[in-house]
Image (cartoon, coloured by chain):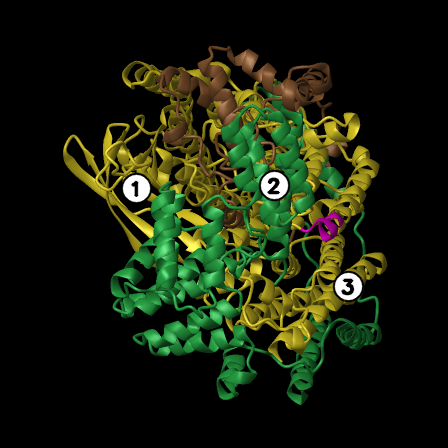
Chain colours: A green, B brown, C yellow
Amino acid sequence: MIAFWVTAGVLSAAAAMLMLWRAAGAAARPEPTDVTSIFYRRQLAEIGDLADRGLIEPEERKSAEAEAGRRLLAAADAPVEAWTPGVGRGPVLAAAMAVPALALALYIAVGAPGLADQPFSARLAKWRASDPRTLAPAEMAAVLEKLTSERPNDPEGFRFLALAEGAAQNPAGAVRALKHAVRLAPERGDLWEMLGEAEVYTAGGALTDDAITAFRRTLALDPKNIAARFQLARAKIKAGDREGGLADWRALLADMAPNDARRADLQSAIAEASGAPAPVQAPPMAEGGGAAGGLSADQMSAVRGMVDGLAAKLQANPDDQEGWVRLVRAYAVLGDAGKRDAALKAARARYAGKPEVLDALTQAAAAAPMKQGQ
Amino acid sequence: MRLKAVAAIFAGLLCLAAAADPADRLADPAQEARARAIFQDVRCLVCQNESIDDSEAELAGDLRRTVREQVKAGRSDAEIKRFLTDRYGEFVLMTPRFSWVNLALWGGPFAVVILGAGLLLTRLRNRTGEPELSPEEAERVRRLSQTDPT
Amino acid sequence: MIAEFGSFALVLGLAFAAAQFVLSAAARLRRSTVLAAAGEGAAVAAFAGVAIAFACLIHAFVTSDFSVANVAANSHTQKPLLYKVAGTWGSHEGSILLWCLILTGYGAAAATLGRGLPRGLKASMVATQGALGTVFLAYTVFASNPLARLPLDRIPVEGNSLNPLLQDPALAIHPPFLYSGYVGMSVVFSLAVAALIEGRVDAAWARWVRPWALAAWSLLTVGITLGAFWAYYELGWGGWWFWDPVENASFMPWLMATALLHSAIVTEKRGALAGWSLFLAIGAFTFSMLGAFLVRSGVLTSVHAFAVDPKRGVLLLIILGVTAGSAFTLFAWRAPKLSRGGVFAPISRESALVLNNILLAAATMTVMLGTLYPLIREAMTGEAISVGPPYFNLTFAPLMACLGLVLPAGPLLAWKRGDLAGVAQRLWAAALIALACGVGAYALVSPRKAFGALGIALGAWLVAGALTELAERTRAFRVSAGDSWRRLTGLPRGAWGMTLAHLGLGVFVLGACCELGWRGEAAEALPLGGSLDVAGYHLTLETVGPREGKNFDAERALIRVTKAGREICTGEPDRRFYPAGGQTISGIALCYRGASHLYMVLGERRTTAPDSSGRGGMPVWLIRAYWNPWASLIFLGPVIMALGGIASLSDRRMRLGVGRRREAQAAPATPDAPPPTPLRPGQEQTA
């Protein structure tokens, strides 16, 4: 704090001195020569030179010399302003004092006096020194990030980092950490399983190629793995093999312990997929993490803007069956039941004679809503 | 770019693809070339000053599909553009129309040329040779050109 | 403490900028040398304050001090060091601070360097510069403080990161160049305002303006070129100029500065066009401010508008309006009283330069209308229209083609009265070369493109014209080679500057027309081992593998390029995912073939639909490739132009003090040391 005020004072004084020093030297500096007349004299000489070499007609020469000559005369006749020192030291000295004072007043108004720097390295050191239980997930993730960079060959570190990133609502960071981890320990099924789950979470519940690959690796290492079996069966259903997928799910249900909490979820997923009335509760298992993933408020508003745009487009040009399906699904995912049902009604009325569109609409309406807020 | 992240969530809502996407291309290369030429003059309405030829937004994809369908159906460029302006207004075309309301836009630059040329010409026509220096003036000029200014 | 010290240095800079204005204005009113010197000292002090503040902000970015709100919003701990530093000017607040740094820097330079200036003119100029500094620093401190802090309990763990599109070496150095160009016009502006206050615009004024205008113009040229190059390889569309509002906004001050550089020559040599030169000087800075702030205000939308903030942006537009408005009012009031210059014949160097200015003014008008007309139309009739590249192709291109056609003749014409027949006689070789190039390009290059051939002819005409002018100066082929060489080495740097600038324009036209005329494009969804053809090159997708960057994960493709079975090169385009912002960016690969580029982009990965045999699900990658012939020339041309500007700037005669002393020594004997050998009329000094 004292150091700050001392440096600020030294800086102000140095700047003020600069001004004073310059002002003190003013008297010693010679009057600047007005170069205007030099230019015109040079021009006159040029004209004479060209004329002597026969490049300008004598008539032309006279008019040119008159033009340049008059400008030379005008420059010579221009009134010369007399400049004097004008003021004594007083006013300049007063300015040299007033300016830093003004700066000080402004600083107190807009600055944050006494607030120390918060470089990341110092904050990280503080977090590392403190009890992990007191840290927020993001702080924990930062500490673990540092730890893993110090021990880049320890898959366990990356696993913990992934957990912290997940808790800190940074699924992309979790995926990144887990990719490291499986590269270090490709034989660990649990890491592959986590990676698959994280990929699904990041993709908002969708089964990406990467996720499927991860679950396949899981299953190869641990054939009984429940999550991997569940997701791969789901992938089967998505790819069109509903019977095969359902069979896998039923087999999975049979293998699960009777007291396993996930049984209820699986049962409802089976019921849904086999065409029974869709259960209303949250989507099953990994998907339940909330498709909202890392969506920030303005991303949400961007999404809503796009959905509104789609709705407006359909209003103007309603003959677009794919558009209606997309719109209904979008409202469902956004959790806007009212608009979803309104859009569904309008679309059903329009495509009453097309069962395949109606099917698609029903499926779209049943899409799982994502969790709002974080 | 943020939209792309969102796109991952709404895989069904957004389809990312550029104009050159082989999946959408027309079979006839001549027709495809015509469609591409039209794309460059059609604005992606929701984007920031991009033509649908450049844009990866979903709406641009829709417009491309529309244009390709019409090209395939054998409509002329003018017909396709009229269809688009009827639907979306003049805003959709990258080339503003030649019309009275756009007179300033199309005529402005050329008006500057004509105005400038006119000014230059009057200036050149009205030129009167500088009258000769009077003997006193000449004498002063002579003296001034000889003195050392410093 | 360092962040707070920066904050203090910033307000100290503001206080000294205000002192600079008050002291210099008082000095002008009271004709006081002491106050004037104090004002100049304050200008240097203001620069020092802002420079320290800027250094402190860089420190905060480098150490990831997220207690500084601007750092938290625009940086990230995982970012490479270069982009941490570049992040300093990547945000709205930071870029305005950079603007202020350069503004006060130019102010300090003008205050210390302008010793040959008459006292009244200098004091007025330093005061104007101080007023500009005060306004922009006040805006920085009160409306957009880059060193504002967050309370301790609201400091985020991790920063928000910088837009990955901006994490690029060309864009890291692009803003400093661009802003140095924009803000360099502020000195020209201040000199114009000071001249209007003093009521004198003469040859000397034109000579004082030229070095500043040259420096700003050269920097702006480099800045715009860097921006175009960035757009070329970062946006991944294969294009380099999109007639986008942001690009247009930087192009308008460039066109105006180019016009000013030429009109100032007439003002200097003949005392003519003084009012017009003043107008251009004020206009160039007005358009610079427009360029820097219009897009920021959110009034216009653009693909590369970053750091948009409508509320503060509108405040900037108000500052712009008041600054430019008062300068133009002063101009309207005082300019009619300025003396008119000498007369000249229709065929003369003056006429050629006036024609240049008319065409450049019309070109500026085109760009301005194309950028702002949609706003005007919407405000007047409520109807939105778009003005896109086709408009500029129909208006701007013909104007520039006219300019290009007459350009080689200009430098060969004499002052006052030129000899057109003599010029034609000297240019016939260049015309023949241009014609041959055009016809050759039309007849021999397939596919046949009339536009491209015309462009090639124009470019060749410009290049050959510039070389003809150089040959004339050295009397090449007419005197002995040794004599020519002596003349060549003895040429003033200003002459070199002009030749280089005109040559650069020709090189640019060659590149641009060739690229636009004959570019090739191909896109396919390729499996591993698949291939596509573009412009005779055969591209094979060899492998696609992961690549891990410091702050991104990427998929990188290896593409092998062959032509007629012979291996040419390999390209490694990638597709990067930045987890910090959740964005995906394509990193392109360029394969250089002489001046031409093979441009490769890795697109998204897809999975093929299963076919009848049940197989499928094969991954394919969307690969786009462009063949951009002579694309290097597009960027090389402006670099040559900027080098010309620097060459001109280094001309001894630009430094008034030196010139004056030599003049003074030479004066008693011969008023103007005559050139060693007789010159033809067209070969007098040009600088």
Quadrant in the rendering for residue C418: top right
In the structure shown, which secondary structural element does the residue marked by tag 3 occupy? helix
**Part of the protein shown in magenta:** C309-314
- Please report whichever mark, 3 or 1, sits nearer to the chain's N-terminal start: 3
The residue drawn where x is 58% and y is 66% is C71
Please check whether the numbered discs 2 and 1 fall on a single chain. no
Q: Which residue is mark 1?
A: C617
Q: Main secondary structure of the magenta part?
A: helix
Seen at 19% across and 36% down, the residue is C562
Q: Which mark is residue A306?
A: 2
Find the distance from the CA under tag 2 to the CA under tag 1: 30 Å
Front residue of B139/A55: it is A55
Q: Amino acid at mark 2?
A: Met
Q: Which chain does the numbered disc 3 sit on?
A: C
Give percent across and percent down for residue A107. 75, 74
Q: Chain of mark 1?
A: C
In terms of secondary structure, where does tag 1 sit?
A: loop
- Depth check, front residue: C218 or B30: B30
Local secondary structure at mark 2: helix
Residue visible at 68% across and 50% down? A34
**Vertical arrangement, residue A98 with respect to residue C181, above or below:** below
Q: Quadrant of residue C6?
A: bottom right
Circle 2/circle 1 CB separation < 8 Å: no
Give, as a three-letter code, the residue at label 1.
Answer: Gly
Toward the viewer: C540 or A64?
A: C540
> Disc 3 designates what residue?
C18
How far across and down, in percent of the image, does residue A54 sit?
51, 22
Q: Is residue C541 above or below residue C415?
A: below
**CA distance separating discs 3 and 1:** 69 Å
